[in-house]
Image: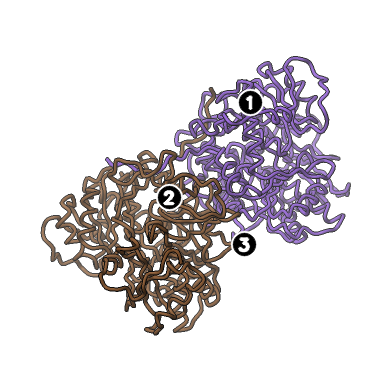
Chain colours: A purple, B brown
Amino acid sequence: MIHGDMQPFALTLNKFLEHAAKWHCTAEVVTGRADGATDRIGYAELQNRSLRISAVLQSFDIRPGDRIATLAWNTQAHMEVCYAVMSIGAVCHTLNPRLLCAQLAAMAEQSQTRILVVSEDLLPLAGDIAERATSIDRVLIIDAATQFDAPYPDRPPYHLLEPLIGEARSERVIWGDFEETAPSALCFTSGTTGPPKGVTYTHRSSFLHTLRLLQTDVMALSAADSVLTAVPMFHANAWGLPFAAPAAGAKLVLPGRHTDGAALARLIAAEAVTVAVGVPTVWHALLEHIEAHGGDLPTLKRIIMGGSPLSAALMERLERRLGVKVQTSWGMTELSPSGTVSPLNNPLRSAVLSGRPAVGVDLLITDAAGAALPEQRNVEGHLRVRGAAVISRYFNEEKAATDADGWFATGDLARIDTSGNLMIVGRAKDLIKSGGEWINPAEIEALIGALPEVSHAAVIGRPDPRWGERPILLVEMRDAQQLSDAALLAPLQGRVAPWWVPDAIYRLTRMPLASTGKIDKQSLRSDYGSPIELKAQHPPRSNEA
Amino acid sequence: MIHGDMQPFALTLNKFLEHAAKWHCTAEVVTGRADGATDRIGYAELQNRSLRISAVLQSFDIRPGDRIATLAWNTQAHMEVCYAVMSIGAVCHTLNPRLLCAQLAAMAEQSQTRILVVSEDLLPLAGDIAERATSIDRVLIIDAATQFDAPYPDRPPYHLLEPLIGEARSERVIWGDFEETAPSALCFTSGTTGPPKGVTYTHRSSFLHTLRLLQTDVMALSAADSVLTAVPMFHANAWGLPFAAPAAGAKLVLPGRHTDGAALARLIAAEAVTVAVGVPTVWHALLEHIEAHGGDLPTLKRIIMGGSPLSAALMERLERRLGVKVQTSWGMTELSPSGTVSPLNNPLRSAVLSGRPAVGVDLLITDAAGAALPEQRNVEGHLRVRGAAVISRYFNEEKAATDADGWFATGDLARIDTSGNLMIVGRAKDLIKSGGEWINPAEIEALIGALPEVSHAAVIGRPDPRWGERPILLVEMRDAQQLSDAALLAPLQGRVAPWWVPDAIYRLTRMPLASTGKIDKQSLRSDYGSPIELKAQHPPRSNEA
């Protein structure tokens, strides 16, 4: 047997920042502040600060494998902390400040997090969490605008991080001194369709995920780009952009807490942003701002969209008004999170197609029981996924998250076209079973959501004594416009079976959105999904009709 | 300690072909034939054939770690064999048919290769090799135009591969059933500056090298591309393109044996090639063909250039006449082979700059002893490199190929500009020491080579009783044009120290080129580098002048 004698090179995430610091030292990380000002720093100096934060953590006896939670927005300090934590082998557990204290405390307790890093404006929430999660023995405050006046209890101790950075000596800090399969970060799923579960990323999985994002047919990031991420770090590490931007040597623009249309338009213009990444609702708000206030964003070339379905109308409006190309994508927390991205040169670019998988991601269409369908193209089925950045087991669970062949069931319903492009057609958990037959809410939502008067449309199932379940429609109208029930349901005529037509319509002033910007169906089900005795506004249609 | 629970995904090279076969099944591998016709196959069918070749190899008792040598051109069959060998854990040892039989037999003996796979037109050479290299117990013939009439000895047995593929059953073949750090291929360096040495690539190193090539700021390959590689497989796996093209789902165009200007122009036009990759001499020949015979190559967008220095004049002519953008690059066999590639959007694109390293490659400028220079930018020094696809030890050698800090000394002299762009300024081994001071032949060659009448210029050292060594100039003139010695040396006036001016000029009808297209300085040194008693044509200049 002969040996392959190439150099060792561990796939650890610290390498991205080290690369940027050495080869793109003046490329910047820019943070938008609430007052419209920006903070900026080059990668070399950001690495320097991050190394000193590692020293601070080690002075608090943080060791490889320890968990540090963050409760913060997309800012330079948050990014510095994430690299500081992960690069010494500790695990960065990003918490979503839009969840309830009880949920967050349960997550922190579950991960046995030792330190909580918090943005100053979230201190009240952090205090409540620290009180409940007994593993937290220290709170570090970042993004503090003012001097900290310690209105908090003695236990656990609170520290402003900035003065500690100033005092820290990083000479003895060693980054990357652990196996590449060590855990790097912990992120709980958004829980729009069930209770949150933890996903434990590894250095290797996120490293390979990052290399995928850099490919021309994926996110195609370049050192010539200025990348704005409107995706928060607590959503799968901001979709991996704090890794991918330094890996490419690109400028990274972080919007801080404020991702309204005006703030994003200002940042895009001021920072010559070329690529913007986030969920449709965010870019919808940007578009509405530009439409209302005028202006152009000439540097912006691409918007990479993901997280929830995109309407063809919004895609077309964005491309026409902003002069950009929209790249659709599909992913989930369990996928690190990118599954597929529609490449810029995809001849079949459309709002409903999410692109082909790049090498390292594989897809399978199965029946409800998980058996592969004999034909994998142009048939609808349940989507499973396998790959280098896909979960194998949820945090703290015994059982595998995959089947015997290593496939992870996404819960999505999908179809793959002849060219290999993925089309997500719905969530399996959202399916409604009426009279023994399935109704796909996503199809109904797409038809009604295309009405110009409709801002959001959601269809959920409601228990029904005769049919098992029946669909009901919840709508939020654009600018409080009015439409009759008949007009709302008209798009369904001839497009779906008559028994798919919802039995009831509820007009909401504001559709409940989860912290990801997705419609919160859990909340809708709890408010509107109870069985009713009353006669439905529309009598159930026969499944045979 | 918590675990990171992401899926296992070994970085083995079979995954690239499997990915292409599944997701880009109709993208083609096209081979140019001598008669101007082409063979073509989709990735799915290519994988199918390659699996059956694995079965053939296993029927000959080939096991993981065994070496299989190939002596062949860039063809579909050669690619099928390479994947068949590597995917079962055997090692593909590519031999360069332009070397001498004695050299090749020594390499085959050194690697203890068991099977020699040979293109039919190279059978005489293969026969001689098999006679000398006793480890070879079988010869497989590919790319056979006619029925094989067995004019060879009984031992070792010879087989045409094609009928064996037809009979083979691949059901029991398992690809990728080995560690990702297993050796995948063996390639000997070109030996233009010394005896050839073997580099043993691993699956992991070539996998990570491939992911680098796919990045937007490196080769930026896309499924929309048609990629022509004029680089032979026996040069570091054709610079990795037989991995990168299927990984991206790109069409791959292989020119077979014939890489003259006419053949390449025909292939580029017929196969709508968008990206062409190879050494400057090949693209020079293409340009001269187009200039002489007219025509356009409208699909061709980029030429990626490497392997030897590129003149600014050739780059400008190529870009103007062909309407392409030229991307320069730097690499070597020991680097798998890509070190840096100048990205398409590099604002400092020029013939002498080779781009910035992508993540996974790191560069260091040292003094002659290997100590890092205190200033790493805008100073000339010896270039060392470190990274995931860089050699750590030559084949069959005990001692490391790296220094104590893991750096590999490239033998190149280089400078890195403020933006991190690499400029190779010469080969350390080519340096001439005259009166205790160094002369860099590359600088003299660049100045004289820029004369429009000069086709090739080389400067080598010749032992000199007074100065130790003195430079001599060897030139090949374009179209047999004439220039006086004074006119040839005129460009040096005021540009180099007077004692750098060569002592003698030799006009060659044809400059000896190594099989890589580089000027063969070893051959020049053996023919012209002997000390002479005669008075030099130009008296030595004083080093003090």
Question: How would you rate the neighbour count of disc 1 (Cα within 10 Å): few for under 14, some for 14-19, many for 20 or more?
Answer: many
Q: What element carries label 2?
A: loop
The answer to whether the residue labelled 2 contacts the one labelled 3, judged by CB atoms less than 8 Å apart, is no
Return the x and y of residue A481 as percentages of the image width and height: 88, 49
The single residue placed furthest to the left in the displayed view is B154
* Camera-side residue of B496 and A423: B496
Q: How far apart are marks 1 and 3 (CA)?
A: 41 Å
Q: How far apart are marks 2 and 1 (CA)?
A: 41 Å
Return the x and y of residue A30 as percentages of the image width and height: 72, 45
Residue at numbered disc 2? B368
Q: B534 left or right of A527?
A: left
* Camera-side residue of B377 and B77: B377
The reply to whether residue B533 is in sight is yes
Question: How would you rate the neighbour count of disc 2 (Cα within 10 Å): few for under 14, some for 14-19, many for 20 or more?
Answer: some
User: In the drawing, what numbered circle is on residue B67?
Assistant: none
The numbered mark, 2 or 3, whose residue comes first in the sequence reads 3
Residue at numbered disc 3? B347
Q: Nearer the viewer, mark 2 or mark 3?
A: 2
Residue A540, located in which quarter of the rendered image?
top right
Q: Which quarter of the figure is the N terminus of chain A placed in?
A: top left
Residue at numbered disc 1? A57
Q: B125 left or right of A534?
A: left
Chain at numbered mark 3: B
Q: Distance between the residues labelled 2 and 3?
A: 32 Å
Residue A194, located in which quarter of the rendered image?
top right
Return the x and y of residue A204 as percentages of the image width and height: 51, 37
* Marks 1 & 3 on one chain: no
What amino acid is labelled 1 in the image?
Answer: Leu
* Marks 2 & 3 on one chain: yes
What amino acid is labelled 2 in the image?
Answer: Ala
* Camera-side residue of A523 and A13: A13
The reply to whether residue A418 is in sight is no
